[in-house]
Amino acid sequence: MTNFFSRAALAAVGMSVMATPAFADVNLTMYYPIAVGGPLTEVIDGMIDRFEADNPDISVEAIYAGNYDDTRVRALSAIRSGEPAQLSVLFSIDAYDLIEQDLIVPFDDVVKGEDGKAWLDSFYPALMKNGQIDGKTWGIPFQRSTIVMYYNKDMFREAGLDPESPPQTWDEMVEAGKALAGDGRWGLMVPSTGYPYWMFQCFAIQNGKELMSSDGTETYFTDPKVVEALEFWRSMATDSKIMPEGTIEWGTLRQAFLEGQTGMMWHSTGNLTAVKDAADFDFGVAMLPKHERPGSPTGGGNFYLFKGSSDEQQDAAVKLIRFMTAPEQAAEWSIATGYVGISPEAYETEALETYTEEFPPALVARDQLEVAIPEFSTYETARVREALNNAIQAALTGSQSPADALADAQSQADRLLQPYR
């Protein structure tokens, strides 16, 4: 990765007589988040280095900015302070807010012709849905996921369960959880901090109901199936007693699983490689259990193009995004993280073909795309999401009943979304 500022400093102290490389014609700033485990900034830096080597007229400052919320704050603060980024990886569900704030450019306006259309059509359709609004494509998939179930095969064997037959239904999951729980360990853990709305989407869709309308103007928090889904989540702590009461931390759950504190956990497939590298026991990965139907929301981050760039910067930014999402880089990122390879062509690369042949769990999240739904996203997404998160946590901690908590969240969502209906 080119360090623009280091070059400037060298020039200032008169070191230009040395073999100082020429300044690039176009400079780009890109913010990106990492919300899963592993030394992943090095992987991004390596991709940027290769892009710059192939495009010596373009210099990229790729800035790791923390989690998704941190990255959004830093990128938008830079824009408002007059030091804008030209592109960023942000939540796939940030699209509505970015459009409302008139900050981003639809890719359809800058990627022209048959070649551009073919590129936009090259990604898995399930991963495009959050970025396609009102007939335009505002986000391009990069680090995308579904939620999968990790399970400890050694603990399954100890409990008399078949490690090659993970639970496929809610009832089977509860029964397996009862067999696994005890002696200071739990049967199942589902994180309920960080992104509780995301996990709750799983329960809701598996119970047969999506949480929001496709146009982002309605939520269905008080639908009986949605209430029943939250009641089921809480019941696994209060009735079945296969998971701890209260909330479970997103950030520490992976380590809890690795330490044998739980026999099963639901988590992002983006943690798969970190689990694979650290687990000292036999583990498996399965699609989430179904109830009325199977399902998981997609998740993760998309590339966005910001307004305010010169034509040269915009062209260079698109060139960089096309490079970062090309099959070879998509395969590399999937292997390094566990995120879904974002296009069918990624799975046809030699690297990912070899990897998935040796490690079939890397295919589970991709296969689950067939039953995946878009991640929760509405107008006023952040505030509506916060209302839902608060309701979920109130129910899980027992401070409100699931029905009352969701009714409060629905009331707040109705107030926020009314202007958009």
Image (cartoon, rainbow, N blue to C red):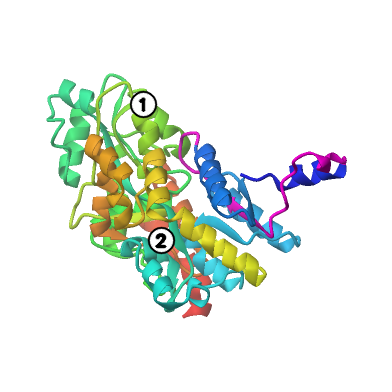
What's the CA distance linking mark 1 and mark 2?
29 Å
> Is 23 in the magenta?
yes
The mark nearer the N terminus, 1 or 2, is 1
Location of residue 204 with respect to 169 vertically, above or below: below
Q: Which mark is residue 376?
A: 2
Inspect the image, locate mark 2, and give the three-letter code of the amino acid beneath it. Phe
Question: Compared to 232, does 181 lie above or below?
Answer: above
Q: Whole-percent x and y of residue 330?
A: 40, 50
- Above or below residue 245? Residue 288 is below
Q: Where is residue 375 drawn, in percent x and y?
A: 39, 59
**Quarter placement of the N terminus:** top right
Within 10 angstroms of label 2, few (less than 14), some, or many (20 or more) residues?
Answer: many
Callout in the foreground (1, 2): 1
For the point 52% across and 70% down, the residue is 416
Would you say 164 lies left or right of 394 here? left
**Quadrant assignment, res 343:** bottom left
Q: Residues within 10 Å of mark 1 (few under 14, many from 20)?
A: some
Q: Secondary structure at mark 2?
A: loop
Q: Which disc number belongs to residue 360?
A: none
- Left or right, 328 with respect to 366, comes to right
Rendered image: mark on residue 258: 1
Indicate yes or no whether the magenta region holds residue 38.
yes
Q: Are marks 1 and 2 in contact (CB under 8 Å)?
A: no
Q: Is residue 336 visible?
A: yes
Q: Is residue 239 visible?
A: no
Q: Where 400 falls versus 117 (above or below)?
A: above
Type of amino acid under label 1: Leu
Residue 357 point in image, percent of width and height: 22, 39
**Secondary element type, mark 1:** helix
Q: Which residues are magenta?
A: 13-39
Judge by depth and name the residue closer to the eye, 308 or 220.
308
Tally of numbered discs: 2
